[in-house]
Each structure stands twice: as C-alpha cells, then as structure tokens.
Amino acid sequence: MRKEFLAVALLVLLPAGRLCHAADTPRVDPQTGQVRVLFMGDALFGAGFVTPMIALDPMVKLTPVPVEFITFQYASIVEAAASLRMYVPRTEQRMREEYDVVIIADAREPFFPPNIQTWIKKGVIDGGMGFLMGGGPQSFSGQGDAHPSWDPSPVADILPCKLTGEAWGLGSQYRLVPERGYEDHPLVRNIPWQQCPLFAHQRVGERPGCVVVGRSDRNPPNSPILLYMEMGEGRTEAFVFDWGGNGPQFFHRWEYGPLFMSNLIYYAAKVSIPEDVSLFLKLRTRLTSFYVTRSFAISVIDFAEKFGGNLRRAEAELGNADLLRKEVVRLYIKGEYEDSMVALDKAFAKIGEVTNIALKAKDEALMWVYLIEWFTVSGTAMVTGFILWTLMVRRAAYRTVGVTRFQL
C-alpha cells in the first residue's frame, strides 16, 4: 500500500513534460515503419522552406500540399477549398488510415472545410494521430482581416496553446530558450539554440494542461514558442515561429534545423527521439550528401546516354547502390544508427564507383563526338583550302580569257 502511495505521489510531483510515456505506441505505417506526414500550408520545395528538410528524413513519408500555392491560383475561398479537397483524403477513415501526423503551417483557416478540420480533431483525440501547427501570418491568431484567426475552429480546439488575438509581427531577433527543468526534454536536448536567431512569430498563451518546452528570450521575453499537449489518444504541438519564406534564413542554414524538424515529427508520432544527437546529426548530414551525390551520378548517366554511351555497367552498379541505400533506410527506421552509418559508408563507396563509371562512359562517348567533329572540320578545311589554292595560286596555269564584244 505504501509503495502504491509513493508511486502515485511521484507521478503527481513530476512535471507533465518529464513523465515517461512508456505505454505510448508509436504512430507509424505498419508496413514500412515510417511516419506518414500530411503537410498543408507553406509546403513548398524551394529555398526558405522546411519541406526539403522533412522530405530528406528516411523516417518520414511526406505528402506536401502547398496551400499557399493553391491560394494564388484561385480568387475565392470556395474555389481554393474545392482544390484543396483534391489533395486530402475523402473520408475520415482514410485520414486516420493514411496519415500519422498532420502539419498545418501558414495557411488560412477558411480554406479548410469544417469536415476536414473535424476529421483532424477526431483523428487526434480518438485515433492517436499527431498534430503540429507552425507559425506564420496565417497561423494561430492570424494577421488582420486578410488572415483571420483560427479561433474558433475544430483545429483550434486541439492546439496546445491559447490564441490571444495578438497579430503576427516581425520585430527584432529572438532565440528559443528551453524552459527551466526541460533542458533535457527530447525535443530540445543537446541542441545549441543560442546559435540560431529567430524572427517572426505569433503571441500565444498557455492552455491549461499544456507543456511549455521553449520560450522566447525577447520580443517579448518569456513568450511561449514551443509547446505540446496530450490530447486524448494523440499528441499536439505548436512551434510558434514562421519557418517559411525569406525571413528565417538562419534556421534554414542551421545544421540542427533538419534535426529539430525531425524531433517535432517524431515526438508528435510518439516515436523515440535519438539520444546521441551528434551521431544522429552526422548521419542526417551524410544522408543528405549521399542524395546529392546520387543525383549527380544520375545526371551524368543521363548526359552520357544522350551521346550513345554504354551505361549498362553504371546502371547495374546504381542498382547495387540503391540496394545499399534501402539497407541504410531500413536500419535507420529501426533506430540502429551506428549500423546505418556503416551501411551508408558502403553506399557512398558504391555511388562513387557509379560516378566514375558514368564519367568514363561519358568521356568515351564524347571522344567519338570530338573525333567526328575533328574529321568534319579538317575535311572541310582541306576541301575548301584545295579549291582556294586551285583558284588563287594555280591561276597562272590557265589561259587568260580574251575580251569579246558583241557587235551588230
């Protein structure tokens, strides 16, 4: 009896954010183990957006819906909402079955029909889905009449923060400071937040039952920036920072930016976040480099193929490199990061062979192009030179044509 009392007392005394959710079951694809993410809002693949950071994580299967782009194409809310419905699941059941985490960032509330918002709300509370809202002038409390507040709405009901009605604004730079007692929280631990200045953000309040993991050091100080809340069977998060566009340039260049975006998605899906941040960061950086190197090798193969190069060996080795890449992803999803790094080194060596083979095939193919061009230019020069020599130099060998006059 005394042990039970002590256990209950310990749970009551511990802060909500420090509780160990040992019984939580990760919300992932049962077939692949990946977190299926539906990202609606500024989900654009380009400079200044977080979409590439998310897409390059092997643990994430991303479905981007660039609502910001859709709104540029349509003049009315009705037309834009109708277009949005083309990208999202048609039923509540499909929403729960096809996605594990839903992200909405910098998207206007009126563009989301009430039934879709209700599916998200029920999917979180009853289905255990994760939800994350990112900042921007169209998120949280909005900005003026053009970008109305999300309150009231079904999505606002599951936010871990209160919408104060204060508008989005730029202001001066600020930095995220981990809440006292939460420095070792999985979302923020071992991340040097002082390295990355942030810019625009909303002003939100703390909802009863939420956990504030990070606050702003200014603009204004102690303003909640990173919050989460257990919502029924699921978990919701708010990162009150405008991560899209040209303003947050430091965040996009920050080496820890992709790692933190992964932390947000993993935690929303109740997937364990790696404790060895240095190894995780190194692996993510190497994975990005691998994808860049692989893209270069494929571009060389495509270029050489246009000139008739023999790329059969290169394509075969590329297939072997892709098999190694799949092994890297498999180990990564299982959380075996050290083994994944070893497999990645092998994949890098193989893709290096592919690149060398493709470059050699390219050189061989272009050699014949250069030879043909040389013979063509040389032959043309010889023919024209002979004609010029015949007409100009050997003109003395020909008899001068006499002058004739036509007379009647």
Image (cartoon, grey):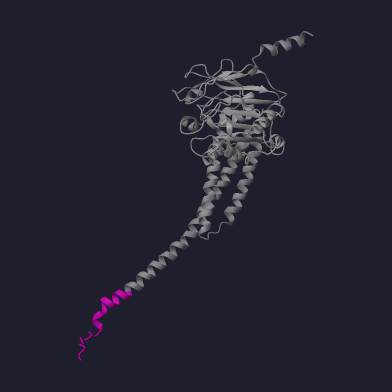
Q: Is residue 398 magenta?
A: yes
Q: Position of residue 248 (x, y in %)?
A: 48, 30
Let me know if residue 68 appears in the view. Answer: yes
User: With 32 as the anchor, is 174 left or right in this view?
Assistant: left
- Quarter of the image for residue 113 reads top right
Identified at 51% across, 56% down, the residue is: 304
Q: Up-down: is 70 above or below 315?
A: above
* Closer to us: 202 or 301: 202
For the N terminus, the image quarter is top right
* Closer to us: 178 or 45: 45
How many callouts does the rendering have? 0
Q: Position of residue 102 (x, y in %)?
A: 63, 32
User: With 240 as the anchor, is 273 left or right in this view?
Assistant: right
Q: Position of residue 12 (x, y in %)?
A: 69, 12
Magenta range:
386-408
Task: Report the residue that reaches farthest toward the bottom.
Answer: 408
Q: Position of residue 201 (x, y in %)?
A: 50, 25
